[in-house]
Image: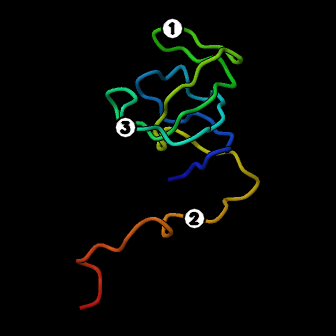
Amino acid sequence: MQCIPGDLAVVVNDHEYPGNNGALLRVLKSAKPEFGNTPYDWLCEPLSTFHFSKTIKPGMPCVILYRDVELKPLRDGDGQDETLSWLTTPESLQPA
């Protein structure tokens, strides 16, 4: 995962709605599996105008869903990769 809750991020890989690439948002929290038909990673607050089946403008009382691979977090530095804190080693790679 690239993003963490609280990150400001830019949309970079929205192939379904390419007009949203370059739009800004704030990552709020992990999305639960029941949101939508696609396995989204994040609930986000729009900070730019987004165009889906309807237009969503900043300040509207709504959240939008995005996959982690569609976002690039905006940070001063790369930060620490926290993947190893939650990812387990596959059994095939563990020493015998």
Question: Separation of disc 2 and disc 3 at Cα?
Answer: 24 Å
State which quadrant residue 47 falls in: top right
Identify the element where label 1 is drawn: loop
Where is residue 66? Give x, y as percent.
49, 33
Instruction: Classify mark 2: residues with Cα within 10 Å, few (<14), some (14-19) or many (20+).
Output: few
Give the number of marks: 3
Where is residue 78? Give x, y as percent.
66, 59
Question: Separation of disc 3 and disc 1 at Cα?
Answer: 23 Å
Relative to 36, say whether 56 is above or below: above
Instruction: Classify mark 3: residues with Cα within 10 Å, few (<14), some (14-19) or many (20+).
Output: few
Amino acid at pointer 3: Pro
> Where is mark 2, residue-wise?
81
Relative to 86, say whether 29 is above or below: above
> Where is mark 1, residue-wise?
54
Identify the element where label 3 is drawn: loop
Residue drawn at (47%, 30%) of the image: 14
Q: Residue furthest bottom?
A: 96
Amino acid at pointer 2: Asp
